Amino acid sequence: MKEIAEKFIKASSDKEYALPHVYLQLAEGSLNNSEVILALDLCVKLEKLLKGNPQIAKNFPLDRFYYTYALVSSHLNYTNKYSAIYSHLLKNYPNSPWTLLLKRKVEWEKRGN
């Protein structure tokens, strides 16, 4: 999966606005295929890219990105990062379907399931 991801990234690297979407889709796919470390690497790269270019972030589904990043953090037991992302989603995107999904997951975890 990592080799395929690198090919997609290389093909999109000259397209400034396409690259973040490629990172997100690859992170989601990696997570779905239980390649959590690759998903984390892609989320970290995407986070840096978005912070370095706020113009791209204006036209990007940040709620979906943070949801994916939170799931990756949860799978890796990165509790502090998971909590920080969850708080960020609740504060900035309270009515997003991605926030509501994560909220249900957190509530389910609190019940001990």
Image: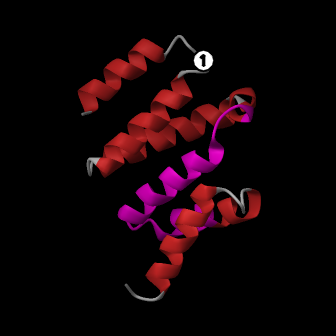
Give the percent coordinates (x, y) of residue 19.
52, 23
**Residue 84 painted magenta:** yes
Seen at 74% across and 34% down, the residue is 58
> Quadrant location of residue 83?
bottom right
Residue placed most toward the observer, 75 or 18: 18
Q: Quadrant of the C terminus?
A: bottom left
Query: Label 1, on which residue?
Result: 16
**Residue 66 painted magenta:** yes
Give the percent coordinates (x, y) of residue 24.
48, 37
Neighbourhood count class around disc 1 (C-alpha, 10 Å): few under 14, some 14–19, many 20 upward: few
Give the colour scheme shown: secondary structure
- Which element is circle 1 on? loop
Q: Residues in magenta?
A: 58-86
Q: Relative to residue 19, is residue 57 drawn left or right? A: right
Q: Relative to residue 4, is residue 23 drawn left or right? A: right
Seen at 64% across and 44% down, the residue is 62
Q: Relative to residue 100, is residue 109 drawn left or right? A: left
Identify the amino acid type marked 1.
Glu
Instruction: Please tell me whether the stretch drawn in magenta is mainly helix, strand or loop.
Output: helix
Give the percent coordinates (x, y) of residue 66.
57, 51
Q: Quadrant of the N terminus?
A: top left
> Quadrant location of residue 52?
top right
Seen at 54% across and 65% down, the residue is 102
User: Is 70 drawn above or below residue 3 in the view shown?
Assistant: below
